[in-house]
Amino acid sequence: MSGYWAGILSILAINIIFAYGIFIPVASGQLNLGGAGFQAVGAYSAGWLSASFGLPVSVTIAFGVIVTGVIGVLIAFPILRTKGVYLVLATFAFAEVIAGAILSSEPLGGAMGISVPGYIDWYVSVIFAGLVTVFVFYLMATRFGLTIRAIHDDEDVSDLMGVSVRNVKVAAFGIGAALTGLSGGLYAHSFSYIEIQGFNALVSIYVLLYVLLGGTQTAWGPLVGATFFTLLPEALRSVLPATKNFLVTLFGETGIVAPPDESWRFVILGALTVLMMVFRPEGLVTRTMVERLQFWRPANRGVTQ
Amino acid sequence: MSAQSPLLSLKDVSKGFFGLQVITDVSFDIAAGARMALIGPNGAGKTTIFNLISGVYTPDKGQINFAGQEISLVPSRKRIGLGLARSFQNIRLMPHLSVVENIMLGQQSQAGGLLSMATPLMGRSRWRREAEDLLARMNLETYPGEVVATLPYGIRKKIEVVRALASNPKLLMLDEPAAGLNPNETASLRDFLMGISEAGTTILIVEHDMGLVRSLCDQAVVLNFGRKIYDGLTRDVQEDPLVLEAYLGSRHAQENAHA
């Protein structure tokens, strides 16, 4: 496999795990705009342990998951007291604090970043992405998943039904953080070098976009959203020059038909995002859509949530 | 606890918001197995009483006893586990959950342990089966997989009652179950509630439809401006001068009393 495709698959797998990490709190109604911060914690925990002590990758990644999960739970208690746009701001602020702390920390390389020794092949991330996908589908089919979705719909009634709203929200936030940490650890070891500039606000926004545009009602949403938005820019990378060549052969290099080139792919991505928000405000994959697909397989009716 | 002690008992309960007194010294008892209506003009404090009993609010003063236990300070989340379940004035089912999932949410108080939280609610799970059985007993079996938001109003009203029933309550509190229903739907709801009552569940409803109140409830408590003005048999309620005054004004009550 060429290095290009190995890189794409690694990024795709990491983005899927990352998106699931954001999806679980979002499914319970908690918008997390601090994704990059949690991912950075996972990546730096694993990278630092690997660079400083030369421990095996399995240990460093597990360490990253645990550190991020614990931080997620600890931060959930104060952060989940806020609601709506304030919660978004609080998570965003958390990511900024993490970025600032790493930037000014010498053992973590500061602005220079650190090189991470233990290299992992693309298929490791792909296997993890598969396992995480199965795990999240399982989770959403349990009573825990049911209470997550109930809290998303109506917190007060969930409480009156006997749901421990705070515990479920903290657990969702912690599990989400741990998954995000996993994506960070895999990132560090797949690309052998991490710098804090790579975990910026745009990254947090993009991963939230994968989840919201993919759909937050079922576990299919983040999978579809992350896959679509990771592969689309890559597809456009070759489609756009081809379109340009085609137009040039038709009309010649006239300059009148300003042909799109590669730099247009982000314009197209942005336009698509707006269109999706207009036409599928609840995300690409919705509950009713999954149900309708299951209609064709009556034996499975009501199995997947 | 003697056999006569009531299932639910309010003693001198008061509640105010920012200096506005909403409930003043309200006391009443509900015996186990009774069907009681809580009625009164708009703004009389009926829903506030429901919110006090279910724990949405804490009373400023007074006691609420349920099944022999003082519950005023029990967190709202734990009350459904004691046997107190309610529905809401405006339907508050979870719109993105299917019918059967809403019912399974109603089972939460009996299935909230860590192990059952981690158990999938697949087709063969005990909880899903029980929820489907309950729906079938209530003649709602046609809808289990549908997302609630797509169902007609009357059906959603019933499903909200069934969700409350899924917790095996001792006391079922329904806030205006017949509001917005047509006469056929109301008649069907009445039979439905009668069946639940005959199965042994105590019922407390807030309702404006006096036809439903008369045909369903044997007892009534009437509130006006946050005070109790009547507590007795439903069939006598419309002859009570205070109740007539509350609903129709004082002159009518006088004329009626002279007549």
Image (tube, rainbow, N blue to C red):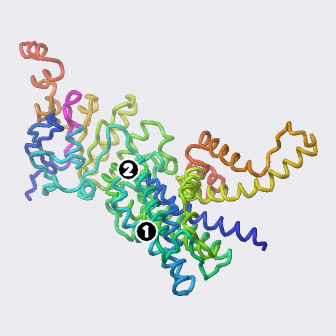
* Disc 1 crowd, CA 10 A, few/some/many (<14, 14-19, 20+): some
Of residue A93 and residue B71, the one placed in the foreground of this image is A93
Marks 2 and 1, how far apart at CA:
27 Å
Q: In which quarter of the image is the N terminus of chain B?
A: bottom left
Q: What residue is at 88 percent from the left and 49 percent from the top?
A: A245
Q: What residue is disc 1 on?
A: B118
Q: For this view, does B36 lie left or right of residue B158?
A: left
Q: Nearer the viewer, residue B80 or B32?
A: B80
User: Is residue A136 positioned above or below B64 on the image?
Assistant: below
Q: Is residue B25 above or below residue A134?
A: above
Whether residue A259 is visible: yes
Q: What residue type is labelled 2?
A: Lys
Q: Residue B225 carries which label?
A: none
Please name the amino acid that badge 1 sits on: Ala
Q: In which quarter of the image is residue B177?
A: top left
Q: Whole-percent x and y of residue B14?
A: 11, 41
Labels in figure, total: 2
Task: Find the magenta span and give its range.
Answer: B33-46
Query: Percent x, y for residue A48?
Result: 52, 78
Screen quadrant of the C terminus of chain B = top left
**Magenta stretch: includes residue B60:** no
Whether residue A291 sits left or right of residue B214 in the image: it is right
Q: Is residue B103 above or below residue A173?
A: above
Q: Mark 2 points at which residue?
A: A83
Quarter occupied by residue A297: bottom right
**Compared to A9, does B141 lie above or below?**
above
Quick check: B223 left or right of B201?
left
